Image (tube, rainbow, N blue to C red):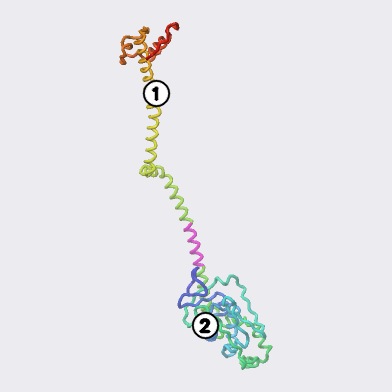
Amino acid sequence: MKVPARSDRVCFPPPGYVTVYEFSLRAGLRFPPSSELIDILTICGVCLSQFFYRVMSIVIGMIVLFKDRGVVLSSECLSRMGRLFSDAQGRISFRSKWLDIRTRDPSKGWISKFFYVQNDWNLQEKWGKLKELSIPLHIEAEDLLRILKLPDLDALYYEVHYLSRYIDEEYLFKVRLTTQAGRSQAQMLKKSLVEAQETIKQYEKNQLILEAEYKRLQSVLFEKEAQQLPSTVIKEFKKSYAFKIIIEDHIQEALNHIYDVEVKALEAECTEDGFIRGFMKGVRAVHRKTGVKIEGLTPSQASGDASSDSGSEELESELKHAFALEEDEDDIEIL
């Protein structure tokens, strides 16, 4: 037996295996399968997993019913008692126009409960298209009564109406479809399947626990890295191109500050000094032209010696004195 993975599909078992639904065990399927069941599957061209619970329980029940009366269920007798048909998905069921066969599987979620069994009986492994059994014209209801050794049709109706009792372990053991009453191979397979499913659930639970622990450890690691982040980031940042750009920007800002504050101040001072020197040159020109004596003007200033010019306060006083000449003097024309 092999437990399928989540990605495995019912209609595509692994090579060398056949798919078996769990409900097939409740429907009376036992391993090895009976020769009658193998013949019916082969003639119809389908596999075990294509049988619904209803058709599986009916076929197994009829096999046991016939065996209990010492005869073998043939495909002709089965087709005389009812008709096999397929739905759009390829699953097989059973319908009878004249026999009231009561079967019902109360289980839910059966479609996901399947497993694989090694194919030692040359069964068809993949799903196939149903080849319908032809209705035998040579078999009538009276022939069935004779084959089953039943007195009348009422007896036949009764047997098929309660056909589900023939898939009980007692009857399966009686006709030797199982080796031990109460502990058949199918029950052992079912027990193994349940244990395998429990193992899978426990594995998934452990996996969730491990994933939660992994996330917790990741969170702790991130916190540790965050505590060591500043020094590491600074070291790496100093090596980066962005750090060089920032340093260059700071240097440029410092150069701009030096130019704005110191160089421009020096330019203003030079401009002011040049204006004063030029004005003094004009005063000297006036003095030479007119001969007017300007008080406070030293001989060196009058002769144009720039090295001995007075300071800004002295020059301001001299200029004010020059403009204070008597108003009644003639205008001086400066050539």
- Give residue 222's position: percent from left, percent from top: 44, 49
Name the residue tied to disc 1. Answer: 268
Which quadrant of the view contains residue 230? top left
Q: Residue at x 50, y 64 (%)?
A: 202
Q: Which of 298 and 24 is in front in this view?
A: 298
Q: Which of 283 and 195 is in front in this view?
A: 283
Which quadrant of the view contains residue 324? top left
- Give residue 56's position: percent from left, percent from top: 58, 80
Name the residue tied to disc 2. Answer: 33
Q: What element carries label 2?
A: loop
What is the crowding at mark 1: few (fewer than 14 residues within 10 Å), some, or many (at least 20)?
Answer: few
Q: Is residue 205 magenta?
A: yes
Q: Nearer the viewer, residue 330 or 233?
A: 330
In the rendered structure, the answer to whether residue 300 lies left or right of residue 327 reads left
Type of amino acid under label 2: Pro
Count every numbered label the image shows and give the total.
Answer: 2
Which mark sits nearer the N-terminus, 1 or 2? 2
Q: Nearer the viewer, residue 143 or 138?
A: 138
Which tag is nearer the camera, tag 1 or tag 2? 1
Q: Does the magenta stretch include residue 41?
A: no
Identify whether 215 is placed above or below 302: below
In the rendered structure, the answer to whether residue 129 lies left or right of residue 321 reads right
Type of amino acid under label 1: Ala
Q: Which residue is drawn at 51% across and 72% down?
A: 9
Q: Residue furthest right?
A: 154
What is the crowding at mark 2: few (fewer than 14 residues within 10 Å), some, or many (at least 20)?
Answer: some
- Give residue 248's position: percent from left, percent from top: 37, 38
